[in-house]
Image (spheres, rainbow, N blue to C red):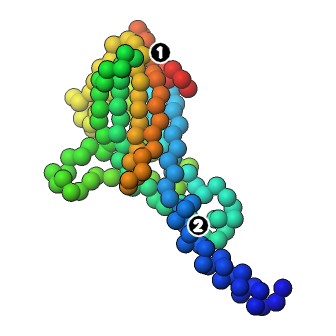
Amino acid sequence: MGLAEWLAAGAIVLAVWPIFQMVWGRPDISFAFNRINGSVDTHLFVHLYNLPIPWRFLASIGVRRDEAKFHVGIIIKHADGNMLLRFSDPPPGSGNPYHQNLLSLSSGLSPHTLEILGANGKCARTYTENRKDSFYEYAPGTYGARIEVFVGEKMFYEERSFVVTHNPIHSYWADN
C-alpha cells in the first residue's frame, strides 16, 4: 500500500469521524438497582451510568461518549396504580423558569446514585429533597418506582417494584 492509499484511508477516517461521534457519542444511560442491608437499616438505591463506547475501533479513532447533563424524575405508585409521590432530582428551585438545575455524569463506571427508600426498624421513607422534614412514609405493601432520566430531549427510563414489609428493615426490590 503506497502513500496515496494511506492518505486516502486517513482522509476517509477523518471524514466519517464526526458522523461516528454524532451517532455513538451521545449519552447512553443505564440503570442498576441494589439493596444495602445494614444491621439497623436498609436502603434501596438506583445507580445511573453513562456507558462508555462499546467498540475498541470507535475509541481508537477518537469517538468519545459525551458527558450527560440531565435531571431525574421519580414517580412512586401504589400497587393499585394510584400515584403517591412525584419529585425530581435536582429540585427545580432556582427561581428562574428558564434555567434548569442539571446533574452531570461523565462516561465511565462511576455512577450517580439515588436513594429511593431508606428504612429502619420503625419506618420506611423516601426523602424528596435534601431536608430531613421532606419525606413520604410508606405503609407495608408493594409499590412501583419509575425513574425517568431526561438528557436534552431524550428520555431514558426504568420501572421496578419494591416491597415494604411489616418490619421495614426487610424491604427489598421485588423484581431484581
Dividing the picture into quarters, in which one does residue 99 lie? bottom left
Q: Nearer the viewer, residue 132 or 94?
A: 94
Position in image of residue 167 (x %, y %): 42, 10
Residue on which the image places disc 2: 20
Give amino acid for label 1.
His
Dividing the picture into quarters, in which one does residue 118 lie? top left
Position in image of residue 81 (x %, y %): 36, 20
Q: Quadrant of the C terminus?
A: top right
Give amino acid for label 2.
Phe
Which is more N-terminal, label 1 or label 2?
A: 2
SS label for mark 2: helix
Residue lying furthest right in this view? 1
Seen at 23% across and 30% down, the residue is: 134
Position in image of residue 113 (x %, y %): 44, 40
Seen at 50% across and 23% down, the residue is: 173
Q: Do we see residue 44 in this rendering?
A: yes
Q: Nearer the viewer, residue 3 or 170?
A: 3
- Total of numbered circles in the picture? 2
Relative placement, left or right, of 58 versus 138 is right
Seen at 26% across and 43% down, the residue is: 91
Residue on which the image places disc 1: 170
Seen at 52% across and 51% down, the residue is: 28
